Structure formats: structure tokens, C-alpha cells
Image (cartoon, rainbow, N blue to C red):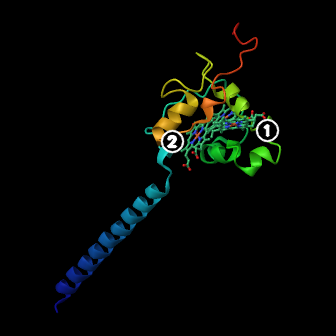
Amino acid sequence: MNPCNVAWMKQREIRDYRISLRGIQATMLILLLAAVPVWAGSSIAPKLDIGKGGQCVDDPKFMRKNHMKMIVHQRDETMRQGIRGGKFSLAGCVDCHASKKDNSVLGSNEHFCQGCHEFAAVKIDCFECHSSKRKVIAEVSK
Ligand code: HEC
Ligand code: HEC
Ligand code: HEC
């Protein structure tokens, strides 16, 4: 082989190497994106009327994933461990999260509970018995 050819071979190897590196990078990016929860990209998250504001009973990210475990009353946490009426009371959630416009967590796909559940295709029957409305006490004047 003449020296010219050797140099050419080297270059080709380098190029092949670069191409495979790019492949690995692309694969990693895809894996990374797949690991991100669906609504982490705010562009596709539902637009929700958060309600009154203040501070949630727990970290909002945690709540997003775990709220159902805290409030469903067939679960031990609610009934046996005395969470009833405590900080995880459903009336408490509603009090904060009801829209300031109509004091409700239901009504449209911007209303807090309904909006996200519609987005996530979840059906709950809680509000057949529990009030979906904030108890309005001296709130009217605001
Ligand atoms: C004192 C008011 C308050 C109470 C009580 C409260 N929250 Fe929240 N919650 C908030 C606020 C404010 C946010 C939004 C925080 C943010 O986005 O920075 C929030 C966020 C959330 C989120 C995440 C929303 C999202 O877009 O990801 C969920 C789910 C949630 N709350 C459910 C509940 C449930 C269920 C209860 C009752 C057990 C409850 N909250 C009680 C104020 C409250
Ligand atoms: C068939 C009627 C009915 C349905 C449907 C229902 N509940 Fe209840 N819930 C009750 C009754 C009755 C109590 C007891 C109230 C009491 O003793 O304080 C209760 C108590 C609770 C409590 C504790 C008290 C409070 O004010 O927070 C929570 C939390 C709760 N329910 C959440 C839910 C959730 C979440 C759903 C939907 C998955 C739901 N419930 C569906 C009837 C119902
Ligand atoms: C940010 C989105 C979001 C918001 C806001 C939200 N939820 Fe949920 N909720 C979900 C998702 C997603 C599920 C289904 C989770 C699953 O299947 O594991 C769910 C499930 C539930 C369940 C259990 C249903 C079942 O059949 O197991 C209950 C009860 C519930 N949500 C109550 C509420 C209440 C009450 C509110 C308003 C105070 C609320 N959620 C607000 C996303 C949300």
C-alpha cells in the first residue's frame, strides 16, 4: 500500500467511528425522551385552573402521581389512619382547587379535577356523593 492509501483508510475509519458515535448519541437521546413523563412537556399538558393557590398538601409532582392513593376511601390510609377530615380530606382538595370563577372542580376541561382526568382518560365517581364545589364562606366578596 502506498502511504497515500494508508492515510485515506485512516480517514475513513475516523469517519465510520464518528458516524457510529452519532448513532449512539441519537439512541441515548431517544431513551432519555422516552423516560420523561408524558406531561413533563408543558406543550401537551392540560391547561388547568389550579384554583385558589397556596401550597398543596404535598409536592405537586408527587401529587400528580399519587393523589389517588391518598384520597380513595377504600384504602387504609383514608379510613383507618384517620386521614378523614385531615389534610387529605376531599373537601380540602376542592376548597383549594375549585375554580375561582364558579367554585367548582368540575365543569370544563380547564376545571382542575375534570380537566386532567379528561386529558388522561380517567373516570372517577367521587362527586356523585361528595361536593365538587367549594364551601363558600365570606369568599363572595373577593
Ligand atoms: C392549600 C391549597 C391546596 C390544597 C388543600 C390542595 N392543593 Fe393541590 N395544589 C395546590 C397548588 C397551588 C398546586 C399547584 C402548585 C404548582 O403548580 O406549583 C397544587 C397542585 C396539585 C396537583 C398537581 C397539578 C398538576 O398540574 O400537576 C395535584 C394532582 C393536586 N394538587 C391534587 C390535590 C389533592 C388531591 C388535594 C387534596 C388531598 C390537594 N391537591 C389539596 C394547592 C392545594
Ligand atoms: C356512594 C357515595 C360515595 C362515593 C361514590 C364516594 N364517597 Fe367518599 N365518602 C362517602 C362517605 C359517606 C364518607 C364518610 C363521610 C364521613 O364520615 O365523614 C366519605 C368519606 C371520604 C373521605 C374522608 C372524608 C373527607 O371529607 O375527606 C375522602 C377523602 C373521600 N371520601 C374520598 C372519596 C373519593 C376520592 C371518591 C372517589 C373515588 C369517593 N370518596 C367516592 C361517600 C362516597
Ligand atoms: C395533573 C393531572 C390530574 C389532576 C389535576 C387530578 N388528577 Fe386524579 N388522576 C390523574 C390520573 C392520571 C389518574 C389515573 C392514575 C392511574 O390510573 O394510575 C387519576 C386518578 C384519580 C383517582 C383514582 C381513580 C380510580 O379509579 O382509581 C381519583 C380518586 C382521583 N384521580 C381524584 C382526583 C381529584 C379529586 C382531583 C381534583 C382535586 C384530581 N384527581 C385531580 C390525574 C389527575
Q: Residues within 10 Å of mark 1 (few under 14, many from 20)?
A: some
Query: Does the Cβ of the disc 2 residue fall within 8 Å of ligand 3?
Result: yes
Question: Residue 34 in the image: x percent, y percent?
Answer: 44, 57
Quick one: quadrant of the N terminus?
A: bottom left
The answer, for residue 38, to whether it is visible in the render is yes
Q: Are marks 1 and 2 in contact (CB under 8 Å)?
A: no
* Residue furthest top as drawn: 141
Amino acid at circle 2: Val
Residue at 38% x, 69% y: name it.
Answer: 24
Residue 106: assigned label: none
Residue at 40% x, 60% y: name it.
Answer: 30
Question: Residue 32 in the image: x percent, y percent?
Answer: 46, 59
Is residue 95 rendered to the left or right of residue 122? Answer: right
Query: Does the Cβ of the disc 1 residue fall within 8 Å of ligand 2?
Result: yes
The answer, for residue 42, to whether it is visible in the render is no
Q: Which residue is mark 1?
A: 84
Residue 122: assigned label: 2
Q: Residues within 10 Å of mark 2 (few under 14, many from 20)?
A: few
Residue at 63% x, 44% y: name it.
Answer: 68
Residue 22 vs 46, above or below: the answer is below
Amino acid at circle 1: Arg
Q: Quadrant of ligand 3?
A: top right
Is residue 37 rendered to the left or right of residue 56? Answer: left
Mark 1 vs 2, N-terminal side: 1
